[in-house]
């Protein structure tokens, strides 16, 4: 009988490990390019709003590309914001880095070298319920280009 108890225990632990390992497959990654009037949106943020209230953001780079990682699967409504560029090195993988002693000098240098170009997007794109942008996110990677119009 002891071996039966151990067998059931091992089977239970194995099931938990297998099911626990499957949780990462329920996340998705979305890559894409945001354009406005046919040109790449140089800076901004794409926000994924999920039905459970969860919101995930992805920064838009100078070439209009974005990558949103570790997204829950399911329907997401999107909002897009245009804003001035974030200084290089300030964000890494959607996390704010701790300040460094060189940050003020680098920020000043960055501002002098590159004048922020922000585009004024129609207000509807800032509201996920009005943007007209939605995506059903599946596990793994997928491509979703966003074409914004006036």
Image: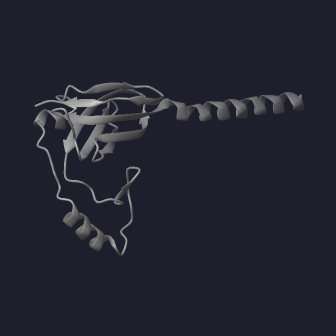
Quarter that holds the C terminus:
top left
Closer to the camera, 143 or 51?
Answer: 143
Quadrant assignment, res 137 = top left
Quadrant assignment, res 119 = top left
Where does residue 3 sit, x and y in percent of width and height?
88, 30
Where does residue 49 sit, x and y in percent of width and height?
30, 34
Left or right: 146 in relation to 143: left
- The answer to whether residue 63 is above or below residue 114 is above
Where does residue 61 sit, x and y in percent of width and height?
30, 47
The colouring scheme, among rainbow, by chain, secondary structure or one colour, is: one colour
Say which residue appears at 32% left-offset and 25% top-offset: 135
Say which residue appears at 22% left-offset and 30% top-offset: 147
Quadrant assignment, res 20 = top right
- The answer to whether residue 62 is above or below residue 136 is below
Left or right: 68 in relation to 82: right
How many circles with numbers are drawn on the protein? 0
Left or right: 127 in relation to 56: left
Closer to the camera, 55 or 106?
Answer: 106
Where does residue 52 sit, x and y in percent of width and height?
34, 32
Say which residue appears at 41% left-offset and 36% top-offset: 71
Quarter that holds the N terminus:
top right
């Amino acid at each position: 009988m002891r071996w039966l108890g151990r067998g059931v225990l091992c089977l239970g632990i194995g099931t938990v490990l297998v099911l626990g390992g499957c949780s990462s497959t329920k996340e998705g990654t979305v890559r894409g390019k945001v354009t406005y009037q046919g040109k790449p949106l140089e800076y901004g943020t794409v926000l994924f709003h999920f039905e459970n209230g969860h919101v995930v953001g992805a920064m838009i780079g100078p070439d209009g590309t974005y990558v949103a990682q570790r997204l829950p699967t399911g329907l997401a409504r999107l909002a897009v914001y245009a804003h001035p560029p974030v200084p290089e090195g300030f964000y890494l993988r959607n996390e704010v880095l701790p300040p460094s002693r060189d940050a003020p000098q680098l920020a000043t240098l960055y501002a002098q070298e590159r004048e922020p170009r922000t585009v004024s997007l129609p207000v509807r794109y800032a509201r996920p319920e009005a943007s007209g942008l939605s995506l059903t996110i599946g596990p793994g990677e997928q491509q979703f280009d966003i074409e914004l119009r006036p």
